[in-house]
Image (cartoon, grey):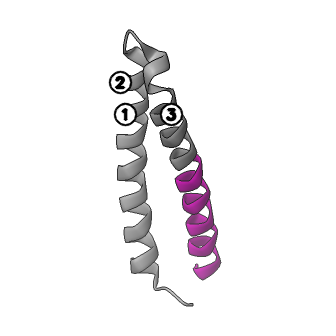
Amino acid sequence: MEFSKDDLSEAKRQINSILHKLRETIKTFEAKDNQEKYKSQITLAKRRVKAFEIANCLIESELRRKN
């Protein structure tokens, strides 16, 4: 499937926004007193961060390829 440079750039912008929010969510959960209570949410958020970082990396590679 082919995507335009504009589509890729917008996807990257959206992913960066989501990454920022996820990282803030992780900080919030980790700052709570009973951190163990939020362990599954923290794990899920960290896994999502990793997935979005991979997606971002692939988008950057595709953008470089198109230049």
Q: Amino acid at mark 1?
A: Thr
| Magenta extent | 50-67
Most frequent secondary structure within the magenta stretch: helix
* Viewer-closest of 25 and 62: 25
Q: From the viewer's perspective, is 20 left or right of 52?
A: left
What x and y, as percent, mark residue 58? 62, 66
Quarter holding the N terminus is bottom right
What x and y, as percent, mark residue 65? 64, 77
Q: Nearer the viewer, mark 3 or mark 2?
A: 3
Q: Residue at image x 38%, y 51%?
A: 18
Instruction: Label 3: state its secondary structure.
Output: helix
Q: CA distance from mark 2 to mark 1?
A: 5 Å
- Is 8 colored magenta in this rendering? no
Quarter holding the C terminus is bottom right
Q: Which residue is label 3 attached to? A: 40
**Contact between labelled residues 1 and 2, with CB atoms less than 8 Å apart:** yes
Q: Nearer the viewer, mark 3 or mark 1?
A: 3
Asked if 36 appears above or below 57 in the picture, the reply is above
Of pointers 3 and 2, the one earlier in the residue sequence: 2
Instruction: Label 1: state its secondary structure.
Output: helix
Q: Which residue is label 1 attached to? A: 25
Q: Residue at image x 58%, y 54%?
A: 51
